[in-house]
Image (tube, grey):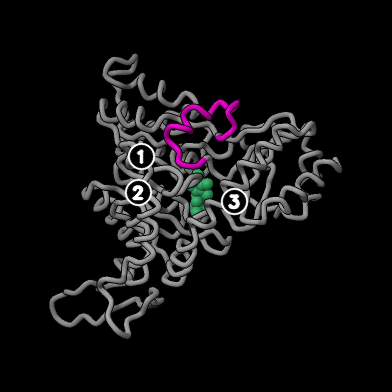
């Protein structure tokens, strides 16, 4: 796979308005707080009602769409984008495959809400995802019960296991399933699920894309117009829309994504390598470590190895003391911010050891950040 055009795409995204602009035009998107638009007689024009469209969303959707190389819709959270990717396509009796080790709220949406409407939800660990999908394929043991939709998250959050996207796309196609990929952990700069054959990509832009821990947002992209139409129809009907001020914030964050993402991934690669050698840790997961179970696939399908690290301490107490003792780690949930953060995922019930800490590596100067991590480790 070639990632060569993503840097050009990013630069073009930053300058996309240049050709259409003339003297005195705005260079950045305006925040347009409008519920209604001038609309006499027969409805016409680009904007008619605030739940249907908004000029500030348009700017954000254009920018994200330029990066994804696909039509894009903005949502008020990652979960709103995921709901729009799943709900319009699943009917009673349909089967859907989801990761058992992915983002918890996606599983809640599926097992508590979609299942209650008659959708059969099957879960499998990300590491075995392709074989679970193959079972429902043309020659599999469950061939008479194909999936209608396969939802993958890779690297999985928080375990950082990886599944083969191009392989999954072929398996999904063979059984007539839609392949939806949650690309939150990598962003379009780190991994290109649509290029690997996914039908829909979704992202929690709350994380690295907005990047400043001050706004929730999400997006959904697809190169198939009918899938965009379905998601747009869902958004308009369900009313889960982004506010114009939030759209502006996400757009502003997006413009520095490349700079932040490169620093975050470079910081994480170096810190993961050093953590892996530190005697206070029982285990370290990072897809970029050659010894990591995710490494082989990550090298093929990811352009960078990401900014998340899984670090397992000997106990809950050691993990909490580490987090509290490191002056450059914010003790927060979520990830992808400018500021490095850390949390023990077992506190939310994730199926990980009590001493497992998910580190989200931020943009701090590398050696300063490592220095404070090392100091906190040595003090344990
Ligand atoms: C955070 C997250 C979401 C949900 O995003 P929200 O903006 O909190 O709704 C979905 N998927 C993954 C992988 C996430 O990390």
Check the picture and name the quadrant holding the N terminus.
top left
In this picture, residue 160 sits left or right of residue 62: right
Q: Position of residue 156 (x, y in %)?
A: 52, 36
Give the residue at x 32% y 66%.
16
Q: Position of residue 287 (x, y in %)?
A: 55, 34
Q: Secondary structure at mark 1?
A: loop
Within 10 Å of disc 3 (Cα), the crowding (few <14, some 14-19, many 20+) is some
Q: Quadrant of residue 292?
A: top right
- Residue at the spot of label 1: 2
Name which of mark 1 and mark 3 comes first in the sequence: 1
Q: Is residue 256 above or below residue 119?
A: below
Q: Is residue 209 above or below residue 355?
A: below
- Residue at the spot of label 2: 5
Magenta range is: 288-304
In this picture, residue 248 sits left or right of residue 65: right
Looking at the image, which is closer to me, 139 or 330? 330
Label 1, label 2: how many angstroms apart (C-alpha)? Answer: 8 Å
Viewer-side label of 3, 2: 2
- Residue at the spot of label 3: 334
Give the residue at x 86% y 43%.
379
């Amino acid at each position: 796979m070639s990632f060569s055009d993503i840097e050009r795409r990013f630069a073009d995204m930053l300058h996309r308005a240049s050709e259409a602009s003339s003297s005195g035009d705005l260079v950045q998107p305006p925040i347009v707080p409008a519920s209604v638009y001038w609309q006499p007689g027969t409805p016409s024009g680009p904007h008619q009602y605030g739940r249907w469209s908004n000029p500030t969303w348009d700017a954000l959707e254009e920018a994200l769409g330029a990066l994804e190389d696909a039509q894009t819709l903005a949502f008020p959270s990652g979960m709103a984008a995921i709901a729009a990717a799943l709900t319009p396509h699943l009917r009673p009796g349909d089967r859907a495959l989801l990761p058992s080790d992915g983002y918890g709220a996606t599983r809640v949406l599926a097992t508590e809400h979609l299942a209650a409407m008659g959708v059969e939800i099957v879960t499998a660990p990300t590491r075995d995802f392709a074989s679970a999908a193959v079972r429902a394929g043309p020659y599999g043991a469950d061939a008479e019960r194909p999936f209608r939709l396969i939802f993958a998250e890779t690297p999985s959050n928080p375990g950082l296991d990886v599944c083969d996207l191009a392989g999954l796309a072929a398996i999904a196609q063979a059984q007539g399933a839609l392949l939806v990929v949650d690309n939150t952990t990598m962003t379009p700069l780190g991994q290109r699920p649509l290029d690997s054959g996914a039908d829909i990509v979704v992202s929690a832009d709350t994380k690295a894309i907005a990047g400043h821990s001050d706004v929730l947002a999400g997006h959904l992209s697809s190169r198939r117009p009918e899938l965009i139409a379905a998601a747009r129809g869902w958004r308009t009907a369900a009313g889960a829309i982004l506010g114009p001020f939030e759209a502006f914030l996400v757009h502003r964050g997006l413009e520095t994504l490349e700079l932040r993402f490169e620093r975050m991934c470079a910081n994480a690669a170096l810190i993961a390598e050093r953590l892996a050698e530190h005697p206070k840790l029982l285990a370290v997961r990072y897809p970029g470590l050659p010894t990591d179970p995710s490494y082989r696939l990550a090298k093929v399908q990811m352009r960078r190895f990401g900014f998340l690290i899984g670090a397992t301490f000997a106990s809950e107490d050691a993990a909490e003391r580490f987090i509290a003792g490191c002056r450059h780690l914010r003790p927060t949930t979520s990830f992808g911010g400018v500021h490095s953060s850390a949390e023990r995922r077992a506190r939310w019930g994730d199926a990980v050891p009590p001493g497992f800490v998910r580190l989200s590596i931020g943009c701090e100067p590398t050696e300063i950040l490592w220095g404070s991590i090392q100091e906190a480790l040595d003090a344990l």
